[in-house]
Image: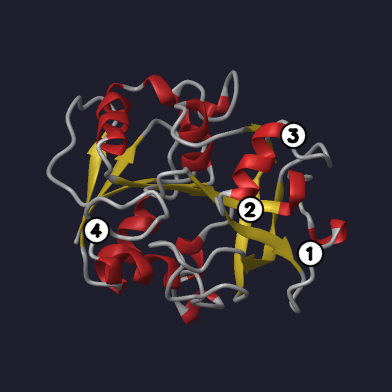
Amino acid sequence: MRFAIPVFPGSNCDKDCLHVLGNVLGQDAFFVFHKEKTLPATDVVVLPGGFSYGDYLRSGAIARFSPIMDDVIRFANAGGIVVGICNGFQIMLEAGLLPGGMRLNTCGHFVCKDVWLRVENGETIFTRKAGKGAILGMPIAHAEGNYYAPPDLLKEIEDNGQVLFRYCDQDGNVTPEMNPNGAVNNIAGIMNREGNCFGMMPHPERASECILGGDQGRILFESLIAAGGGSVCKCGCRG
């Protein structure tokens, strides 16, 4: 599969994504500079983590207007698969590719630590190899990871199975104490209603090799590779 990784001023996880997808998983992964106006032929776009444009204004708010994003939005609206990790998730929210928004962590500062995630929907192209109820360990590193949606929108997201991950303890218990940033309903990752756009605050690319302390993050990329790319139907399955 071909994975395009847009690089913005301030991206710092682009090379991590390139390494995992290309060297670890053997896929055709390549960078796309943010000033380009057209995506090369690709199966998946991965918006990497970092601090695009220094996180000025709001995280992701300026990157959303980089020239390449017009074609990323076009690609997504045509059914193409887009994955956003940390800052990439924030960019997707700002671009309207995912519902809701992001606020500052309730603790008021940057948080960098390992967390546990519970898979809430195991029937998507992003989670199928993990399965519903799986507990995965990954790191986080952000100051604006407090996901929020107003009550009506939140109910819609929950009812549609768009929540893919929640922060939990090692046994899968979802509690306020295990919420590292104050995200509503302990939400760590969501997809759009159509099932082709997915964003999460934790970093699966930093948990894809045992030498780094764990490889449970790679199961997300392996799920995508097993699905084979292409467009998806509204439930998140390949269509």
Q: Which residue is rendered at x = 62% and y = 41% of the image?
A: 156
Residue 123 position (above or below residue 188)? below
The answer, for residue 103, to whether it is visible in the render is no
Which of pointers 3 and 4 indicates the residue nearer the eye?
3
Tag 1–tag 4 contact (CB < 8 Å): no
> Between 11 and 144, which is closer to the camera in this rendering?
144
The image quarter containing residue 82 is top left
Comes first in the chain, label 2 or label 1 = 1
Left or right of 53 on screen, residue 221: left
Q: Which residue is mark 3?
A: 151
Comes first in the chain, label 2 or label 3 = 3
> Between 85 and 53, which is closer to the camera in this rendering?
85
Comes first in the chain, label 1 or label 3 = 3
Mark on residue 229? 4
Q: Mark 4: which amino acid?
A: Gly
Q: Quarter holding the C terminus?
A: bottom left
Query: In 3D space, how far apart are the residues under numbered discs 1 and 3 (Cα atoms)?
Result: 19 Å
Query: In 3D space, how far apart are the residues under numbered discs 1 and 4 (Cα atoms)?
Result: 32 Å
